[in-house]
Amino acid sequence: MRIDLHTHSTASDGTDAPAELVRKAAATGLDVVALTDHDTTRGHAEAIAALPERLTLVTGAELSCRLDGISMHMLAYLFDAEEPALLAERELVRDDRVPRAQGMIAKLQELGVPVTWEQVARIAGDGSVGRPHVATALVELGVVPTVNDAFTEDWLADGGRAFVEKHETDPFEAIRLIKGAGGVAVFAHPGASKRGRTVPEAAIAEMAAAGLDGIEVDHMDHDTDTRARLRGLAKELGLLVTGSSDYHGSRKTCVLGEYTTDPEVYGEITRRAFGAFPVPGAGGV
């Protein structure tokens, strides 16, 4: 089995519609794919309706968190999307996205960049607006050559000249909410130092004690040494190890199935979850 547990669609900051994403996942030869848009489940229904035969969908979301000033992401799998407490927190995070993007645009304009809200809103479309959409606007304007080049101290990285904070969930609260909604919590790309400061291992150990299920080890932002270190940490703490592409369509260079999760780990995730179940493909529409 080939299992990719971290992808994004146009419901957040990916470039493929949910239906297109699951069709591509099947064509790529994946057996299981998780749709984990940022702080939203809006793409799930479309993905389920289009799900090809022989492809299973894991419903999920990637929650925006912050610990001691460090931005981090928590992958939530197979939770009850209508559970009130987790739903309210996701809405709180999403509601802060528009004023945050507008604040970044204002800072960029002060720096002499002729970006506008209209441009960023067009790029975001129906998705939850975020930094990747602002970064794409900088690419369109020729300010930076790629989206990744916008995530530096000069521009949009944490603490960068055009950075604006947003509401982000405490990760311990996120774990509590995910588990309370019957889901499974996995810390996304914990060693992605290119994105900024990373959470120390001692904090990951505290999260494990608080109910964290796993860490995403095999990821494009982890080099070989980082993957080995994280794999050792996961073993020490009794955490599941996942691998994923973090696919965003054409917005990033990663491809579907670039990194995958071991079938036994996937089986354990499905055994632990009780908020929702994986959805088997029925041929799509």
Image (cartoon, grey):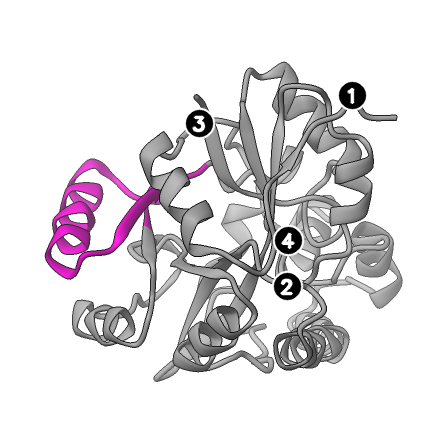
Residue located beneath label 1 in the image: 283
Q: Around disc 4, counting alpha carbons within 10 Å, would you say few (fewer than 14), some (14 to 19), or many (20 or more)?
A: many
* Count of numbered labels shown in the rendering: 4
Which contiguous range is marked in magenta?
216-244
N-terminal label among 2 and 4 = 4
Mark 2 highlights which residue? 80
Locate residue 144 relative to residue 228 in the image: left or right. Answer: right
Q: Secondary structure at mark 2?
A: loop
Identify the disc placed on residue 258.
3
| Cα–Cα gap, marks 2 and 1 | 24 Å
Circle 4 residue? 37
- Badge 4 vs badge 3, beta-carbon distance below 8 Å: no
Is 234 part of what is drawn in magenta? yes
Q: Earlier in the sequence, mark 3 or mark 2?
A: 2
Real-space CA distance between mark 3 and mark 1, rounded to the nearest whole angstrom: 24 Å
Amino acid marked by disc 1: Gly
